């Protein structure tokens, strides 16, 4: 029997520790409607499907979102979210509940989007202000206001419009919320979003590069109660740098 040298034992132990550190079990099981779904969240998989499945076509012919109904998306409860990483969102619960009733979308989905988009900062600025970070076109009468409820309603209205346009497909709707697009949009030679698009001349002209880990981070990170901006930043395989300074979107 071969005897492992101490240096090799140390390296193997480090590999095991790294693997354990880069996985988490949210305790929600795995989604039978999602390909590549796993009970544990890893850099490339999770309860709502693998990143390769969520990003179908991104590395070749263009993003072709698979179908996953919003009603079948797995997630932790709203109380669990508020008790953990979503604690900054709890103060806005009344607004999420109101929009949920108006648009029939689970309030935990809305709170998670607010956390991902603005870290639940109602004062977040930019061209898409507030909690939900959507354009003023989605506000009542198409005009931004200082109302937190208007802001949450605007974000929920946009998400609902994308769900309706996608026939209820949560993957396509969430992608659209982050600026992802499918074939037929007229962009990228009408192909849909691809890995090389964000830092192309056309992609740069259309603003900040899309986060290519977005779907995996939302569906298998934020919705599982994991802090993608903090301790759980290991979720995702593209590691989009969001600036194209090095001419690419993969570190």
Image (tube, rainbow, N blue to C red):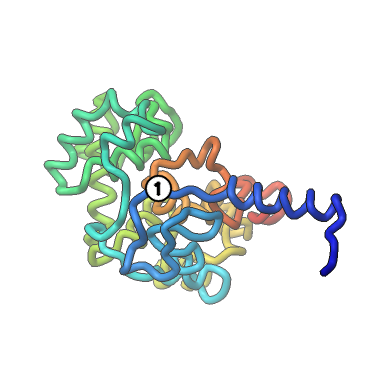
- Residue, far front: 1
- The quarter of the image holding the N terminus is bottom right
**Residue 92 sits in which quadrant?**
top left
In the rendered view, tell whether residue 208 sits above or below residue 34.
above
The quadrant holding residue 180 is: bottom left
Q: Residue at x 43, y 36 (%)?
A: 127
Direction from residue 28 to residue 226 in the image, left or right: right
Q: Which residue is mark 1?
A: 26
Residue 13 x %, y %: 72, 50
- At 65% across and 47% down in the image, what residue appears? 17
Q: Residues within 10 Å of mark 1 (few under 14, many from 20)?
A: many
Residue 236 image point, x, y percent: 55, 53
Q: Residue furthest bottom?
A: 61
- For label 1, the SS is loop
Q: Is residue 188 left or right of residue 243?
A: left
- Pick the front one: 194 or 106: 106
Report x, y in % for residue 47.
39, 58
Relative to the observer, which residue lies in front, 141 or 26?
26
């Amino acid at each position: 029997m071969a005897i492992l040298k101490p240096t090799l034992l140390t390296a193997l132990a480090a590999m095991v520790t790294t693997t354990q550190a880069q996985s988490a079990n949210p305790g929600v099981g795995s989604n039978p409607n999602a390909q590549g779904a796993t009970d544990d969240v890893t850099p490339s998989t999770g309860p709502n499907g693998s990143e390769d499945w969520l990003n179908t076509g991104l590395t070749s012919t263009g993003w072709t979102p698979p179908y996953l109904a919003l009603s079948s998306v797995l997630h932790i409860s709203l109380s669990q979210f508020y008790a953990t990483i979503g604690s900054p969102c709890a103060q806005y619960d009344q607004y999420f509940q109101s929009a949920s009733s108006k648009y029939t979308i689970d309030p935990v989905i809305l709170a998670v989007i607010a956390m991902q988009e603005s870290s639940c900062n109602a004062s977040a600025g930019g061209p898409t202000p507030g909690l939900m970070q959507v354009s003023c076109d989605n506000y009542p009468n198409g005009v931004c206001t200082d109302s937190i409820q208007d802001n949450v309603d605007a974000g929920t209205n946009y998400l609902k419009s994308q769900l309706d346009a996608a026939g209820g497909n949560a993957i396509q709707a969430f992608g659209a919320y982050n600026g992802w697009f499918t074939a037929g949009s007229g962009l990228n030679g009408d192909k849909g979003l691809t890995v090389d698009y964000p830092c192309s001349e056309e992609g740069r002209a259309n603003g900040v590069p899309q986060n290519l880990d977005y779907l995996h981070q939302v569906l298998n990170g934020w919705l599982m109660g994991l802090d993608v901006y903090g301790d759980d930043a290991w979720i995702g395989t593209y590691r989009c740098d969001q600036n194209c300074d090095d001419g690419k979107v993969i570190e």
